[in-house]
């Protein structure tokens, strides 16, 4: 899905902001069912419009990204928030201090991950980075470890309604509905959002930053080296050229291969 999605962006010369928020997806019958898309049959991945009320659209809500940013058992707003901050928005996230222990998930459902992360944000050495990463990650908490939608966490404790589910091996297992998911947050800029849909609208408002990071990543791919400070003016020139047309990705690639940053390396 992700490969076809990015291929479509290049071939159709779509704007860079499509990476964050798109009105289409590539699904087959099984993936469409996973996403809650109605009336789809077949094993081949095909482009389909995003249903009006669906939170899907763009890389942030694709099952591949949501899966690789979870550990298979629990989700982490920190990991997901850091991934998006670095890979999509181009904002560097420092490594955590070695003296600060990692958060152990509460599988009993007594506390939510948001409540646990309050401990980190109360530490001055952690608050700066967590205020940047966590809000973005919280917006994705409605998606479980394989990218399925959820309104409540699962709990292995004794509280909550008991539910019968099925594992990957087809065997039944029992779990309880835990606390409700809270996907609201406030960005470092002070802008607030209520869910992933409203977060995506805030992120695409700064489409130049999305385009700038994509340009950098494509430049690394094309040249095999990280752009230097002295390359900055040429990269900004390319962005200025692309700005009136919304930073189309196909044209961006053409500008890269015609740039002295590519031709002279």
Image (cartoon, rainbow, N blue to C red):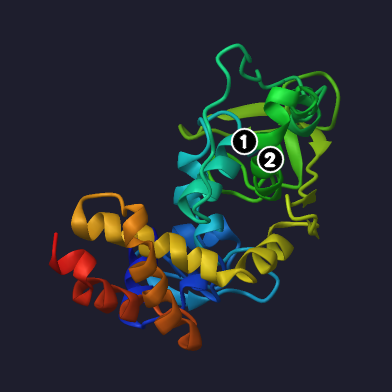
Q: Residues within 10 Å of mark 1 (few under 14, many from 20)?
A: many
Determine which residue is flagged by label 2. 134
Question: At 74% from the left edge and 52% from the top edge, which residue is drawn?
Answer: 187
- Numbered disc 2: secondary structure: helix
Question: At 60% from the left edge and 43% from the top edge, which residue is drawn?
Answer: 81
- Numbered disc 1: secondary structure: helix
Q: Farthest residue toward the top?
A: 99
Report if residue 112 is visible in the image: yes
* Relative to 244, residue 225 above or below: above
Image x and y of residue 87, in percent: 46, 50
Question: At 20% from the left edge and 51% from the top edge, which residue is drawn?
Answer: 224
Question: At 74% from the left edge and 28% from the top edge, which residue is drawn?
Answer: 117
Image x and y of residue 151, in percent: 76, 47
Q: Nearer the viewer, residue 62 or 151?
A: 62
* Direction from residue 124 to residue 72 in the image, left or right: left
Task: Kindly indicate the quadrant of the structure image that contains residue 190.
Answer: bottom right
């Amino acid at each position: 899905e992700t490969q076809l999605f990015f291929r479509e962006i290049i071939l159709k010369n779509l704007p860079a902001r499509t990476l964050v928020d798109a009105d289409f997806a590539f699904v087959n019958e099984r993936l469409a069912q996973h996403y809650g898309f109605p009336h789809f049959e077949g094993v081949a991945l095909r482009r389909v419009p995003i249903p009006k009320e669906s939170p899907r659209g763009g890389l942030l809500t694709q099952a591949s990204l949501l899966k690789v940013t979870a550990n298979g058992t629990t989700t982490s707003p920190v990991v997901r928030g850091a991934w998006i901050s670095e890979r999509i928005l181009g904002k560097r996230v420092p490594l955590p201090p070695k003296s600060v222990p990692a958060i152990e998930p509460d599988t009993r459902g007594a506390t939510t991950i948001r409540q646990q992360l309050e401990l980190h944000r109360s530490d001055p050495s952690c608050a700066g980075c967590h205020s940047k990463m966590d809000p973005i990650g919280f917006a994705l908490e409605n998606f479980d470890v394989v990218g399925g939608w959820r309104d409540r966490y699962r709990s292995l404790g004794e509280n909550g309604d008991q539910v019968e589910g099925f594992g990957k091996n087809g065997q039944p297992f029992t779990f309880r509905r835990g606390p409700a998911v809270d996907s609201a947050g406030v960005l470092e800029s002070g802008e607030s959002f209520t869910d992933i849909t409203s977060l995506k609208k805030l992120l695409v408002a700064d489409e130049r930053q999305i385009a700038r990071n994509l340009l950098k990543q494509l430049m690394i791919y094309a040249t095999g080296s990280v752009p230097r400070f002295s390359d900055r003016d040429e990269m900004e020139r390319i962005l200025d050229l692309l700005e009136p047309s919304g930073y189309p990705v196909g044209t961006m690639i053409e500008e890269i291969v015609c740039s002295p940053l590519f031709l002279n390396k």
